[in-house]
Image (cartoon, grey):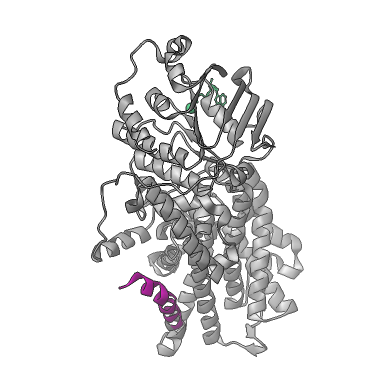
Amino acid sequence: MNPQLMTRLRPIGYAGVVALVAALPWLGLDLFWMRQLMLVAMLGLVVSGLNLTFGYAGELALGQAAVYAAGAYAAGYVAKNLVNDVVLVMLVAACVAVLVGVVAGAPGIRLGGWMLAIGSFFLVLLVPDFVNLIGEPLGGYEGLSLIPLPQLLGVELDQYYFYVVVVVVTGAWFALFRNLVMSPRGAEFRVLSAGETLSSSLGVSTYRLKLKAYAIGAVPAGLAGAMFAYLDGYVSSTSFGLHTALLVLAASVLGGMHTIYGALLGAALLTLGPMSSSAFEDYSTVAFGAFLLIGGVFLPRGITPLLRNLLARLQPGRPVSTSTQHGSGRFAPVAGGRLDVSAVVKAFGGNRAVDGVSLVAEPGRITALIGPNGSGKTTLLNVVSGYYLADEGELRINGDEVGQLSASRRARRHIGRTFQTPTIPPDLSVFDTIRTGALKKEVGLLATVLRLPSYHRRQRDAAVETEAIMAALGISDRADDEAAALPLGTRRLVELGRALASEPAVLLLDEVASGLDEDEVTELAGVIGRLRTAGATIVLVEHNFDLITSVSDTVYVLAEGAVLASGGPLDIAQDDKVRQTYLGSGPVDRKRADLVDAYLGTE
Ligand code: ADP
Ligand code: MG
């Protein structure tokens, strides 16, 4: 079928499935099974929040069960004492859940990794004590009972209509969740999971994004909490202990934590499967724990990807090309800026890794930094991009001092870079990876999940921009391939494309040629030459002396953190001091002639 038609029909098909599930009681579904499906929906909601924070954003936050409890207690209290309207109660429950999630998560997120895991885990253990401390309003250890039947606009809902509400709310959440995950805003979370260095180099403020993941992940847990409170009219802290925390984690791992609907699949398997029998209950905590260990080892990506692969095999596949076409396209004009580094010092303890370096990089010029291992090249790049603050000296871009800005600020305004080891998040296509370079241009969360017109406009603009970059790099035929799985040479081009997508004033390339074979280096020389012609300011850190002397306009030779020599590439190649320190006494490689050809062929 025509893919565009598929895109149009998708929401209709989805709504049809939700409507069908909602109508099941009128098609003969009995009360027992209605209850089972509601339990699946509730667990699935809680799990989907974990999939977002842990699966996609990589935050080991285990407090989802406590957030679920917060939603249930808030809903029970409000319905009983304040206002009993299912929509309002769910809204309040979601808000309280977000609050609890964020307040409990913020310190852990600041401290990072294990602190977050441990902190959020303690949150789960604290629930009963906290509830008891509040005492009467929440029912203490006895539990909060006599929660009234749900009402909607003043009309009491019987079990059947409550079931419909549960199905519709769950369906709506998963639609929005999908819209988030399958969007540039979703890609942002995957960028986060690839590490702080990458996210800040793409202009993402890591702390804020982590908090956002935590807040969004709390919403479905809050909704499920409200459903829980209404389902039996009773909330007790024993329902949200370690057992539930493990159940949620096990369902996430089983369904696949990097999935959307896998949350429902995992929830269904654990709710309806053999483990739900009462005989099993006594052993369930131990069993979930054992299951987690086994699942983590043998099924690290869960069941859903297995099913997906199976389905993909049944469908006729799209032909996948294996060759990389040679890049020969032109780059659109680039507005490069002037970089001034003056007398920069960066010391690690007593080791002055960068010791008073001054250099200038200009638009339409390639400025190279060479030097033996440990001479301070990467450290200098890290100072320029803002991972390290310089101890002394100044950094200016187009005359503006940028030395005090955070790395993500500098990235948003001025600097694009690639890494010595390509850093590409998993599960993103080449197209989507390159597009993450332009995160600052993407529309907001609300426009994204609701697919507002501004979202579709941005999709069209981004397609034009991203395709132009891929064409210029010669990787258009790889657009749909998973970027992280490509060969090194192509991954380096993808990283270069991602850096370009941010339209940087200064482009920093760290060891772009390392690990590439001769043909790939030749191709890269061509790409870099065309970028220069387009007007980019390129700072090239390179080990490969042939590449440097073939393409650069100015070369700075670093040794022990200081500039040993600088000048045109040919002068540098003939400089005795440089030859001794850097090249040893060996002859310059024969391949240089090819590189010069590839490079000159671009002008
Ligand atoms: P290059 O990229 O030229 O190989 P680097 O900039 O990586 O060199 O390293 C320069 C010096 O700084 C080396 O002596 C290295 O050990 C030291 N160095 C680099 N990064 C750190 C760090 N994070 N902590 C301590 N020392 C470091
Ligand atoms: Mg280095």
Q: Is residue 241 visible?
A: no
Whether residue 7 appears in magenta in the rendering, the answer is yes
Which residue is nearer to you in this view: 508 or 14?
Answer: 508
- Say left or right for 45 vs 344: left
Whether residue 64 appears in magenta in the rendering, the answer is no
Which residue is nearer to you in this view: 533 or 558?
Answer: 533
- Say left or right for 323 vs 93: left
Exactly how many numbered labels are in the figure? Answer: 0
Outermost front residue: 603
Percent position (x, y) of residue 514?
Answer: 39, 30
- Say which quadrant the N terminus sits in: bottom left
| Rendered residue at 75%/70% (across/down) | 137
| Rendered residue at 66%/87% (across/down) | 153
Which residue is nearer to you in this view: 225 or 56?
Answer: 56
Question: Does 169 sit above or below residue 456?
Answer: below
Prevailing secondary structure class for the magenta stretch in the rendered image: helix
Percent position (x, y) of residue 489?
Answer: 35, 39
- The residue range painted magenta reads 1-19
| Rendered residue at 58%/63% (across/down) | 445
Question: Does 492 sit above or below residue 286?
Answer: above
- Say left or right for 97 vs 465: right
- Say which quadrant the C terminus sits in: top left
- Say left or right for 229 vs 273: right
Which residue is nearer to you in this view: 383 or 228?
Answer: 383
Percent position (x, y) of residue 98?
Answer: 65, 62
Percent position (x, y) of residue 152?
Answer: 63, 85
Q: Is residue 205 visible?
A: yes
- Residue 85, by quadrant, is bottom right
- Residue 66, by quadrant, is bottom right
